[in-house]
Every structure is written in C-alpha cells, then in structure tokens.
Image (spheres, helix red, strand yellow):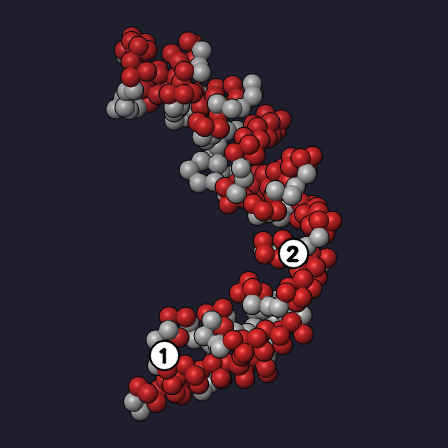
C-alpha cells in the first residue's frame, strides 16, 4: 500500500485530522476529507460543541462560501454552540437572534456578540457576569457602572485569594485587561484585604507606577518589603522609607547576602552594616 492509498484510507473515515496534517493534504484528498467530514457532522450530535463530528474553524476556513453558509445555518437551527468563526459568518438577523439568546441565558459572548445587544440587555448580562464572578472583556468593562466596578474587582480578587494569590512577576489576565485607574483600585483592594484578614504581602509585588498612586495604606505594604525574609525595594520605595526604615532595610538586605548589589542610594547607609560586622 503506497502513501496515496494510506491518505485515502484515512480521509474516507470522516475522522478529524489535526490542523498541521490538513494543511499538508493534496488537493484531491482535501476535497474528499471535507466531504466526509460534512457527512460525519450530520450524523453526529451537531449541537454538542465538544463532539469530534463538529467541524473546527480551520476546517470551516477550507469550505466554499455556499457550503459554509449551509453548514452554519444547520447549526443555527439546532441551537448549536457556534464558534467565533461560525458566528462571524452568520447573516445579521441570525447574529442578533443568537446574541440575545446567549445574553438571556448567561452563555459565553465575544465582543462582536455583545455589541449587538440593546443597552438594557448589555447591563443585565454584565450584572449576571459580575454576580457569577466571571471575567469581562475590555469592551464589557466599559459598560460597568462605577458603583459596580468595586464589586467586579472584589469578585475577581476573591477567586485569587481562594486559590492563593500571586501578584509578583505575572498578573492574571483579568487584571491585565484593566485600565490604569482600575489597576490602582485593584491594589488598594488587595492591601485592604491583607490588612483586614491578617494575611501577608509575601506573594504581592506592586509595580512602581501603581505604588506611587496608592493611598496612605501603602505604608503597610512598604513596611512588609523591609521586613521580608529577602528584603527588596526599588529606589522609589526606598525614598519613601523613614530614615529608621532605610537603615533597617540596608542592614537586613546586606546581612543575609553580603554579595548583594549595592545601589547608589544605599551607599550612605552601608556604614551601619559595616559597624555591625
């Protein structure tokens, strides 16, 4: 059996191929593969988006416009969980219908779907997502009432604290979606939570550009950086320390690691380290 026979044997099964294998199919095999996949989709549970019989976006992109339209229309009829690619290829009236259905039932929506909704439906959907502590896109966040912003942020942070918050080198996606003002608000809420619950700042590092905009409670975060097992503060934070805390910080930093880099702003305080040694 040669290579052509093997390819034909597999594509005839109607089973899904990985994208990298589909792109390598010769023209004659691609046509057969897509025809068999369409047949498989009709016999499968077409409303089940997890089914292997459902065509993937990279398969749909290989269909001609007429076949694609017929396939998607059939999916609409059975109220299927359409992919973003399928939705983008719908007629406008179907987009409106599906968007409203998804919003009413609290299902996943992308920005294209959300933009179609009437304002009241947008608000109802956002209120539901905030209540469920779901992450909102940038567009959806722009529709959140000012009074509900804190509720949304607390919901996202509640999940982080439940599973062990880690705001150090990498921040969660929902945080990265926030504008600068909301990022500041997020860290203010984190500090308040830590203080009210007697927790630690060990897994929290506040970026300098955020820190300088925080309120008076930032002093508690700053103190924790000085007393950390491995103390480290940036120059901005160092300059915000009291003279006493500057001495404490430099002594602690260079006593546990005598090879630690000495920054220019630390030099005037190195004499306290040397005196102890």
Determine if residue 39 is in view: yes
> Label 1 crowding class (10 Å Cα cut-off): few <14, some 14-19, many 20+?
some
Quarter of the figure with residue 73 = bottom right
Q: Could you say where residue 80 lies in the image, as x and y percent from the top left?
A: 63, 70
Q: Nearer the viewer, residue 221 or 277?
A: 221
Q: Residue at x 61, y 71 (%)?
A: 48
Q: Nearer the viewer, mark 1 or mark 2?
A: 2
Of residues 186 and 277, the one nearer the viewer is: 186
Q: Secondary structure at mark 2?
A: helix
Q: Position of residue 209 (x, y in %)?
A: 45, 28
User: In the image, residue 226 lies at what x, y percent?
Assistant: 43, 20
Name the secondary structure under disc 1.
loop
Label for residue 50?
A: none
Q: Which mark is residue 116?
A: 2
Q: Which residue is mark 1?
A: 25
Which quarter of the rendered picture does the C terminus lie within? top left
């Amino acid at each position: 059996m040669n290579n052509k026979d093997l390819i034909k044997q597999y594509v005839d099964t109607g089973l899904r191929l990985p994208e990298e294998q589909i792109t390598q199919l010769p023209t004659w095999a691609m046509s057969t593969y897509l025809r068999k996949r369409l047949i498989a989709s009709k016999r499968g549970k077409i409303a089940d988006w997890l089914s292997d019989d459902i065509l993937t976006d990279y398969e749909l992109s290989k269909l001609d416009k007429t076949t694609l339209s017929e396939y998607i229309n059939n999916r609409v009829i059975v109220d299927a969980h359409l992919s973003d690619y399928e939705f983008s290829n719908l007629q406008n009236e179907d987009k409106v219908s599906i968007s409203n259905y998804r919003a009413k039932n609290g299902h996943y929506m992308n920005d294209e779907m959300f933009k179609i909704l009437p304002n009241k439906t947008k608000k109802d959907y956002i209120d539901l997502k905030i209540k469920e502590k779901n992450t909102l896109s940038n567009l959806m966040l722009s529709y959140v009432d000012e009074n509900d912003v804190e509720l949304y942020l607390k919901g996202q942070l509640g999940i982080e604290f439940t599973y062990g918050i880690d705001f150090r080198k990498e921040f969660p996606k929902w945080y990265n979606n926030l504008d600068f003002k909301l990022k500041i608000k997020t860290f203010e809420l984190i500090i308040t939570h830590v203080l009210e619950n007697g927790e630690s700042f060990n897994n929290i590092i506040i970026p300098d550009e955020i820190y300088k905009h925080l309120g008076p409670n930032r002093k508690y975060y700053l103190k924790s950086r000085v007393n950390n097992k491995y103390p480290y503060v940036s120059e901005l934070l160092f300059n915000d320390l009291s003279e006493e805390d500057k001495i404490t910080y430099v002594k602690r930093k260079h006593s546990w690691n005598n090879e630690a880099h000495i920054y220019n702003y630390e030099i005037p305080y190195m004499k306290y380290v040397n005196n102890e040694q």
